[in-house]
Image: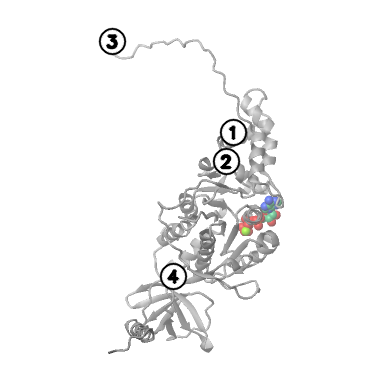
Amino acid sequence: MLPRSPRWIRHLSAARERVEKPRFIVEGRLTRMVGLTLEAVGCHAPVGARCLVEGPDGQDIEAEVVGFSGEKLFLMPIGRVQGIVPNARVTPTGEAYDVPVGPALLGRILDGGGNPLDGKGPITHTHRTPLTGRNINPMARQPIREPLDVGIRSINALMSVGRGQRMGLFAGSGVGKSVLLGMMTRYTTADVIVVGLIGERGREVKEFIENILGEEGMARAVVIASPADDSPVMRLHGAALATSVAEYFRDQGLNVLLLMDSLTRYAQAQREVALAIGEPPATKGYPPSVFAKIPQLVERAGNGDSGGGSITAFYTVLTEGDDQQDPIADAARAILDGHVVLSRELAEAGHYPAIDVEASISRAMTEITRDEHLKAAHRFKRIYAIYRQHRDLISVGAYQPGSDPQVDEAIALYPQLTRFLQQGMNEPVSLAESISALQGLCPPEPEPEVAQSAPVPVTVVPAAGNP
Ligand SMILES: Nc1ncnc2c1ncn2[C@@H]1O[C@H](COP(=O)(O)OP(=O)(O)OP(=O)(O)O)[C@@H](O)[C@H]1O
Ligand SMILES: [Mg+2]
């Protein structure tokens, strides 16, 4: 009779596991390095796997498998590359990319790999979550129903943002993106703010955190910074990490505001990776995989399938030379639920935030606003547009007051409308204040009187041609 004690059974099943799942790791070696692309042979690892390349002084360099050709694996380093030699050993780690998340992240600043940058010691996390997120069945996603107060008067009133909505912030350089994102971080009513600073200048990261966010903004924020001098794979990871952190807080039932600066730099990082491994460029040098990556990232934001949490996201899109036809801007416009356009003309005139209300739109606004609010917003935009259309005539004195009552009204109201649109950097405006200010400025239009007109006489014109 064989012994059947639980200890014996445990011992046997542990032995079986060891026999059934041998973890052989096949090491390869480096055969080529061109630019940042490493080619390895002899090892097997799937695309997206993490590998260690033997560096100088026994220090390993982390790299990610980004493609393959026949037996060759293409890798891209994640950190800095220095001192890599031919035939260096390449070891797949066999581990998936997952990132630490937990409430301890609040108030912290991380790099694209999830390591702290703020010198406040290691992060005690409670969870690990995959960098690529989990898929949500589109049928199970909660719809956008509630507005989110972003603390900016013109956005709250004229292009209201819903919880779970994904917006684009389209702007050229230096027109006030960072200040606007900082204001939202400080004044929004969202529970947690996740800021992804991807591919921007390193100097700007410190400035953004110290001058724009400040202590107040940092308290309920997590910042992930992967500046322009990080490797492209690190920058891609930075954007994915920011999204994973936002997903974690959403799954805790919280309302998260995710601010990603910028989606264009994310696309450029993917372009660098794709071109380096030989993908052909398509539109403006961007290979097709870039246009597949953008929706993959953006679709992770939004409402969850359960738990009631949401990720409302703003992605900045750089319109270089204020070119609105940029392929990334086009792709972003198609996938996002609305856009806020910042205008250089307004910024140059000292009108901040430089939001072009005519070009900006929130596609979820009708779902989340009351009728009176929506009517007031439409009226505001109409009066504003009438003034802008006649601006040249008015400014040269060619418009005769009294010739069009709508233009007269627009001229009278315009100074108040522009004051309404402007907001100082240190001035929070709540959603309720924004709506009541809008309704005060643009009360409902009186119902048009139905005039009793005489019947129009009909004249019959004989048709030309043969009688
Ligand atoms: N609400 C505001 N009130 C007053 N000044 C503002 C406001 N917003 C922006 N500015 C001015 O605009 C300047 C540029 O803003 P910001 O740095 O946010 O631009 P940016 O679009 O992020 O630039 P970059 O493309 O260089 O990142 C600021 O230094 C500030 O002087
Ligand atoms: Mg900026």
Q: Label 2, on which residue?
A: 358
Q: Label 1, on which residue?
A: 379
Q: Label 3, on which residue?
A: 467
The amino acid type, in three-letter code, at marker 1 is Arg
Q: Nearer the viewer, mark 2 or mark 3?
A: 2
Q: Considering only order in the chain, which callout, 1 or 4, is on the residue closer to the N terminus?
A: 4
Label 1 Cα neighbours within 10 Å, binned few <14 / some 14-19 / many ≥20: some
- Mark 2 element type: loop
Q: Is residue 59 above or below residue 130?
A: below
Q: Is residue 90 visible?
A: yes
Q: Nearer the viewer, mark 3 or mark 4?
A: 4
* Circle 3/circle 4 CB separation < 8 Å: no
In the rendered image, residue 331, in percent from the top left (x then y), is placed at: 46, 53
Label 2 Cα neighbours within 10 Å, binned few <14 / some 14-19 / many ≥20: some
- Mark 4 element type: helix
What residue do we see at 65% from left, 48% from top?
353
Q: Locate ligand 1 by image quadrant.
A: bottom right
The amino acid type, in three-letter code, at marker 3 is Pro
Q: Where on the picture, by quarter, is residue 400?
A: top right
